[in-house]
Structure formats: structure tokens, C-alpha cells
Image (spheres, rainbow, N blue to C red):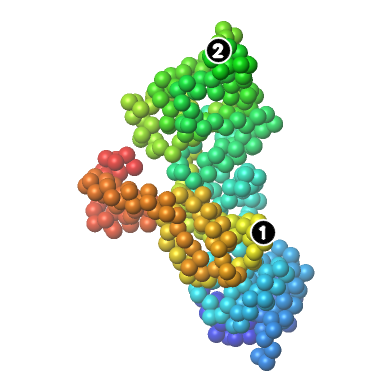
Amino acid sequence: MVIDDDVDVLTALRLLLKPLVAEVVVEKNPGNLPGLVSENKFDTVILDMNFNGLINTGNEGIFWLNKIRELSPETSVILITAYGDIDVAIRSLKEGASDFIVKPWKNEKMIDSVTEVLRKRKTPGQEKIKSVVEGGKIIGESDEIQAVFSKIKKVAPTDANILILGENGTGKDLIARAIHENSNRKDKPFVKVDVGALTSSLFESELFGYKKGAFTDAREDRQGRFEAAQGGTLFLDEIGNISLRQQARLLTVLQNRYITPLGSNEIIPIDIRLICATNLHISELSDEEKFRKDLIYRINTVDLIIPPLRRRGTDITLLTRHFLDLYSGKYSKGPFQIETDFWKKLKSHPFPGNVRELQFMIERAVIMAETNILNAEDLSFSAIENAVQKEKMNDLRLETVEKNTILKVIDKNKGNISRSAKELGITRTALYRRLEKYDL
């Protein structure tokens, strides 16, 4: 429902929002609001703050905001006004408004605000999916991340070994913990090991443990990570970076289901659920000169591919607001009003560092902000990630350029092969041949 005494505003918002929702109800007179709210179940009310042309304090909007919350607590309220008083905005947000938008609004800002509110109102089944991971702070409502959540629901109760694939910063460790916390082993240990960082000499002692005197510095018995995870989940991160010798040792343990600590002949049976993760593409893991195929089959009963942030659509908005709330509280700043140019700059960035990069970016913006209004100038992108991107772009081999162009166009078209082929100036068949050629 849209409530405003300006007919032009009602018409403009009805036309703007009609493609997004099932129904848009417009109303000039706020006095009719109690009856309308009582008789209908509105997901969202867009409410003007000033109905008396001579008085522009915003008090009317606050009054009707409180009335809506009293009559229908589950209804979200977005306030709009031609008078951008930051004190009124802060007051309205404290009173429970979902957002505060200044007239004349930018259509992109209005659509983003309404879309976010509507996405929070989930069906019971969707809410159940979100609850799978909300304890681990995995946030997302895009189709891409919801598909991951749905897969977690299916695999978590089993003992299947899981391989999590995804770029750096996509949250692979959070996904691993979410699987554990929704499994039958949730009351047992969750043990994480960054195996990619272990040297050859440390690999066996860390994973399998050792007895006193097994080597020079072994002054006492030490339990290995496999034994520490007994009955629970062992998460091996960066599995793609271990050597062939380490792979062989790991495969033996997974096949035999027991370990032998260094310096001992004792066999210790193991009962663990294994989750592995890597930022390598599955094609790189299929190269037998780098990774044993028999080990891949052993650790990859089910694979979970975590989408990069650039493919997650409105999750960027959702995550940004989450991090703003988090760091506003941490640094006692805000609440913040976000300008359109802020969103535009944010959404045009490819986020090579994914969610982790976005998190640090928003934290930096909150720390450095001099007012409670955030605009494009408050956003600065990671020099580290930009350097990595520049290095990738400097590879001008023909195959690399073609491969990167294909990936960029498919990303842009959200995986639609027909549109991508048309934009690239080739047929669908030709594009499929190139996808097969580059193992994409």
C-alpha cells in the first residue's frame, strides 16, 4: 500500500512497483489507513511523512508508523518525504521503519528498498532453509545461494563426504560449519585444519598425532586432528594444495578408517564425517599430475559449489545492510542513510574477494565516515584485490582473453547461454564448444 496526498506520487509508485508485486493499493487519506490495514494483509506500506502542507515536522508520519505497527506488527513500513531531515530519519528508523527515502526518489533506490523488504517475508519452507545456516551468519536470499542452502538440508543429516568448491572469500568454512551444525554429529567436535599450510613434516604429526620421543621435539604424546574429531566432523580446508605424497597418506587413512600415530604401532579406529574445501576449479583437481583421482572420488561423494558474490544479485544489498548494522553497533555510529551513488558504485564492482572483501569494505566505510550519510566517496576498493585482478588481466594470451571474455559475458547474462552467444556474435553450438574446450 502507498499512502500519499499527492496523486502524481501515487500514480508513479503504482506504475513503478506493479511489475514487482501481486497488488499495489494506493490511498490519499491517511485517516483510512486503520481500516485498510485491519482488512488486508499488506507486506509493505510506503508512507508519506507529511500530509499537512503547512507543517513539515514529520510527526504525522511517525504517528501513522506507530499506528501501523500497532495494528499489523508484521507489516514493514518505508517512509518517504520531500524534507530530508536526518534527525527525522534517525527517529523513524528507531521507531521501527524499514527504510527512509527522500523525494524525489531514485527508482533504483525505491526498487532496492521494496525488494529487500519483500525478500525478508518468506514462506515457511524458505524460512526453514534460511534457518539451516543463520547461526553461522550465512546471509543470502538469491536463487543461487538458496540452492546451496537447499542442498545443505539434504546432505547435512547424512554421513556423506562433502567437497566444497568456491573462490576465496565466498564462505566455504561457514558452509562446512553449517553442515556440521545441522547433522547428527552436531553435539560432537567440529575440527578445522588448513592442510594447505602444513609442511610435509607437519602433515602427519598434525593429522595423526604422535607419541613421546617419535622425533626430536616430541616431548609428550599428542593427539592428532583425526582423533580430536572422533564422532564429529573433520574439515580439511585448502585440500587442493597438498602434495601427491600427502594425498596418498590421506587416502590410506580414509580407506582403512584408522590412524597410526607417529612413533607407535597402535591402530586407532576413526569415526569422522569428512568435509573438504578448495578454491581450485574442479578441472584442476581432475589433473592426475596434481591430484589423485581415487582421492577425489573418496572425498567427493557430494560437491557444493558456492557462487561468487557477483552472481548473487540482491544479496549484495542484503549483506551490505547486515555489515552496516554490525559495524554501526561495534563502532557506535549511524544509523546511516545510503545515497544512490553509493549503491551504484557498489553494484558495479566485480568483488574478486567476494563476501570477505565486501565485509572489510563496509567496515572501512563505517570507520571513516564523517557523517551519517554514505555516498560513493565513502567506498574504497581493496588495493590487494585490484592488484590481483590487474595481474589476471595482464595475461594477454589469446586463449586466456577468449576464456575471460566468455566468462564475463555469461556472468553478465546470469548464465543465459542464448543471450551470451548473441552478445558474443556466435551460435549457441559454437559457445558450447568453447565451454567444453575451456572446461567451463
Q: Residue at x 38, y 31 (%)?
A: 285
- Secondary structure beneath label 1: helix
Hey, which residue is sitting farthest bottom in the picture? Answer: 54
The quarter in which the N terminus is drawn is bottom right
Q: Where does the image place residue 20, in percent across and percent down from the top left?
A: 53, 66
Quadrant for the C terminus in the image: top left
Please state the horizontal and vertical placement of residue 78, each as a whole percent of the image.
63, 71
Q: Percent from the top left, x then y, of residue 438?
A: 29, 41
Quarter of the image where one finds residue 110: bottom right
What kind of residue is marked 2? Ala
Question: Going 62% across and 19% down the picture, which residue do you hit?
Answer: 222
Nearer the N terminus, badge 1 or badge 2? 2
Residue 339 is left or right of residue 34, and the answer is: left
> Residue 200: percent from the left, percent from the top?
45, 23
Res 85 → quadrant:
bottom right
> What numbered label is drawn on residue 329?
1
Task: Give the left or right position of residue 387, taking residue 152 as reference.
Answer: left
Furthest-right residue in view? 70
Residue pictured at 42% horizontal, 50% vertical: 384
Q: Nearer the viewer, residue 202 or 166?
A: 202
Instruction: Name above or below for residue 27 compared with residue 198.
Output: below
Query: How would you rate the neighbour count of disc 1 (Cα within 10 Å): few for under 14, some for 14-19, many for 20 or more?
Result: few
- Residue 23 visible? The answer is no
- As helix, strand or loop, the secondary structure at mark 2 comes to loop
The residue positioned farthest toward the front in the image shown: 216
Residue for point 61% across, 13% down: 212
Marks 1 and 2 sit apart, C-alpha to C-alpha, by 50 Å
To which residue does mark 2 refer? 214
**Relative vertical location of residue 54 with respect to residue 122 in this rendering, above or below:** below
In the rendered structure, which amino acid carries the disc numbered 1?
Gly
